[in-house]
Image: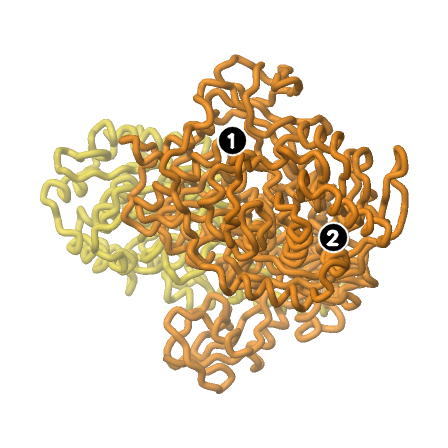
Amino acid sequence: MHIYINDTKYEVSENDTIIQVADRNEIHIPRFCYHKRLSIVASCRMCLVDVEGAKYPQPACSTLVRDGMKVNTTNTSASQAQKNTMEFLLINHPLDCPICDQAGECELQDVSLEHGDYKSAYNEIKRTVIDKDIGDLVSTEMTRCIHCSRCVRFGEEVAGIKELGMTGRGEETKIETFINQGLSSQLSGNVIDLCPVGALNNSLYKYSARTWDLKQTSSISSNDCLGSNIFYHTYKDEIKRCIPKEDEEINLSWLSDNDRFGYEGIKSDDRILHPLIRRGDNLEKTDFNTISDYLIESLKLYSKKSCGIMSAQSSCEEMYLFQHLLRENNIGKIDHRSKECDFRYQKNFPTIPSFDIKLSEIKNLDNIIIIGTNVSKEFPILSIYFREAIKNNDTSIFSFATYEFEENFPLKKSHVLNSQELADCFNTSTTETNVDIDKTGNNLIILGPAISYLSNYSNILNNISRYAESNNMKLSLLGDQANTSGAWAMGIVPHRLPGGVAINKTDKSGNYELLSDTDDLLVIYNLEPEYDFSDDNKILEKLKKSKANIFFSSYMTESIKKYAHIVFPLSTQVESSGSYINTNKKLQQYEKIINPLGESKDGADILLTICNSFDSSLTHEGVKKSIRAILAKINVNNNFVQIANLDNVKNSNFLEKIVIRNPNSSNPTLRRCNSLLNTHDNDDYFSIPLDKTVSDNDKIILNENNNKLKLTIKQKKHAKPINTVLVKIGGTHKEKIGAYNTEVDL
Amino acid sequence: MIKVCTQTFGHKNPSSIDTYIKLGGYSAWKKIITEKTSKSEIINTVKESQLKGKGGAGFLTGLKWSFISPNDSQKYLVCNSDESEPGTCKDRDILRYNPHSVIEGMLIACYAIGASVGYNYLRGEFIGDQWNVTNNAIKEAYDQKLIGTNILESNISIDIIPLIGAGAYIVGEETAMLESIEGKRGMPRIKPPFPAVQGLYGKPTIINNTETLSSIPYIIKNGTDWYKNLGEGDSHGVKMFCMSGHLTKPNVIEAPLGTRFSKLLDECGGVLDNKKLKAVIPGGSSVPVVKGEVIMDTPMDYEPLMKIGTMLGSGGVIVMDESTCMVSVLERISRFYYAESCGQCTPCREGTGWLYKTLVKIRSGHGSQSDLDLLNRVANQIEGHCICALGDAAAMPVKSFLTNFWNEFEYFVEKKQSMII
């Protein structure tokens, strides 16, 4: 089948529209409402083209090709129609390009240059629209709106939340939120990119630069394990904004709000700008040599009772050097799992926890079981794939979690269970399982990061992996941080070297607990003791007692101020270069976007300098080579090996406190992004003890060991697991929340 | 005087089922379900009767029905009672005085196309009277087991569900109506796919006008020849004409298609106060206006009216006498389309406002000659460039008023006042 566009013959397939053929062959047709990832409405009438035999010009976006069809995109009929539409669009559009952020990249401006007239025949009063406050992320200038409805369709079709809609009729048609709500989905920022004019703007970027002055550099997201591809736009060494870089394997044309706005925190007042050393009660400025010597000295002094804990948001390079440095100094207690407390399964854990299938294959699955993750909040990009799967293949999605939440896609069934029930319901040895799905199809089980916080994580893993194996289902893991897969691959675990090579030395005590037996030296890398540990009381206790506390950190916190002996000022991800391994085991490089603030330095540079004092042969290039070699050698199977007999942690008859992962404060930079924190649901706590009768705003006190935690009840109307108190971490709370998952009394 | 859709008009309790049955109502429906008449036979009967859609477009109803695929999938029938075209008030009276003919017509249509549900979508403004009458009538028919599950023990089940709009003119456009029924904002869909292929909830759907469906029982009962022969001259069938404007006795008249305009005028007692007839809009405000003398002898049917440059449309005949200022009339008509554009397509959303504002300017004495050219140009830019016909409906009056009464407009912009004092 073929058609002619402007007298040139093009091969087409049956369901092509004219605009698709034109786009494939780089024939320019102006458009506003058409977007390749949204449904077709053909309402802007900008893409009108001349079709032989048709009385009037036809919209290229909605007109299907016919064999032998003759289309002209430039003749008088087509160009007059486009000119006419342009005239209509401009009569009510303000001429405020000089103060509009969209100017320079405005689709209306571009087409106006092509088809617009230099003067308007319209002499009446132009329409003005009162701006709406739709939240801290997207600012509005609705007078500029040309009603293309891309933002509305994005909400309905892609994000699955109808946040913006059309109200009014005719010229009075307005795009607005219903009942004066703000945007709050984790994908809301995408409407900024979709808006062809300057009606929906990026609040953080507003009036801060002109588009033609910006320098574009590609990078990788540091906020979740999907590793979305992004572009940073900078001006004079300052990040002005962040937009998606199209990637068909990961984020398509979209970006989560965390990725888009997550750079705001780097300019926080908390940034550590100089190397610091403790003098009495205070931390004082010093130089890198002094603190490097201090670290080297400490490593020599305290190798026995020491440990190094590193954030899984660090780059592979930092990880490789970190474990190299510590292991060279006989410190084997290295970990990234600061939020976990059950390590019994670790020897059986896959070499690289990862997503077993390509994201693009999700749409072919029959059933998906998601365990312990609120996908639309924690992995918004993934939720887009789920919605596609439901649309494409009628995929059934089941959710198992310790609390009930809303998703932006329909769940076939949602189970809310406590931690014990969660382990039990996948126990294949009991005859009756709660899981009622067709086991013959193409099925996938996904384990969310919050499951790893549970005190019976090992039991859950053991049961689920056995269940998956016996039912021939794929099992995938979503990491807590951007480089969780990298952390496992680079040996940031006590029992494996880089590449997953097991350490043969048998652990006498069998005690893998992170902080046990570490009374001398603590090296804490890019983690905040207040927020990043499964038991904040315990880590603070340790810091108090330990003989040397070495921090690598970008941000100052109360506990660092109080307990650090030396602090290396780390540059943030955007100020460094490195690589992440995403959940699909894809190694993605990122480059430095802006220069580090103050004296802060790329962690890989700091670590390499220190390593070179032991081993001068190490170079950045050598490290990169090693990382590639490690990844190439790793067995790609995502194998879980079951443990024959694994005891239950405790019996289920106790009141357990379970923490809820807060994706908007999952790393130190995000915790300092005020726009994001203001936008999303960041209730500090909500708690639901189930067998007790409590009502909203009741104050309860949880007793755990010797600590007391005061909570105000915010009952959610949802179903609740029995014997469980839920506490949300992160946000802006100032109180200590104690051990993540533990027995408590009321 | 012939009576088809208006059969019960003038009787005592015209809307009650007893009156309707007494006059032979539901006999066609009962015959169909007892004899299990084949669907194709019914469709052929309607096709041969030359019954044309009375909503405005005049498309052959039987032909429309035959587009629906004969397989067993879910299908829908929608009765378009969203009668909103200015000057049109026929469905209003049918629903008020002869609601059972619509119900029977819907039942027959549902049966013929294989739909198990028929929706009757009434305009929002009908909430006071027609809405109650329709609901009562449907209840009466349910009580007599003429609608519902296993109708008269025939194993045939059809439900009729009345719906009421919220006051948007555009929902009278068939695909916008489907959107509205689905609970969405009333905006026309892109065609193709046509509703007969992909309509309500994505299923094949037939949408017919109230008057069309109301005619169905009579055609089935009395046969195709009877209906065809009702027309005058070359025309077939009847039509309800909503006679409004400067008339001694404005009225809704059911008359044979092909009746000359002069005869309709006589039936309404002539032009009010014996003034001279100036202009007529024969099919609701969206069709082109014609001068009085041109239409006087024209048979009121689709083709003859096309020949004089206008359309039969919905049959809303608006009569204007010599005292009418055409600039004012056009301004008022433009205001309507400006207010009722759904806002979807650029030319209509922006253009209808431009037309209206320019006309306001002219009528307030601030217009110029170039504004008249502008009106013509903008109307041409809208016409044919939008998804639905509302843009055309806004453009056609402008163009026809300017063509037919150019001197009056020119006078206004020159003298800054109306030619009519």
Q: State the image coordinates of residue A346 (x, y, percent, origin top left).
A: 49, 42
Give the residue at x 71% y 59%: A93
Task: Please give the residue where the numbered disc 1 appears in the rendered image.
Answer: A455
A538 or A21: nearer the eye?
A538
Q: Report the side of A689 relative to B411 (left or right).
A: left
In which quadrant is the N terminus of chain A drawn? Answer: bottom left
Q: In this structure image, what is the colour of chain A?
A: orange
Q: Nearer the viewer, residue B249 or B174?
A: B174
**Residue A650 spot, x, y in % from top left:** 46, 23
Q: In this rendering, is residue A385 above or below A63?
A: above
Foreground mark, 1 or 2?
Answer: 1
Amino acid type at mark 2: Thr
Q: Is residue B89 visible to us here?
A: no
Find residue B331 and report its horizontal and vertical position in percent.
63, 55
Relative height, residue A512 to residue A275 (above, below): above
Write the residue at 40% across / 33% down: A646
The type of residue carrying mark 1 is Ser
Residue annotated with mark 2: A572
Chain B shade in the render: yellow
Q: Is residue A160 visible?
A: yes
Give the structural element (helix, strand or loop) at label 2: loop
What chain does badge 1 belong to? A
How many labels, in total? 2
Q: Residue B378's image quarter?
A: bottom right
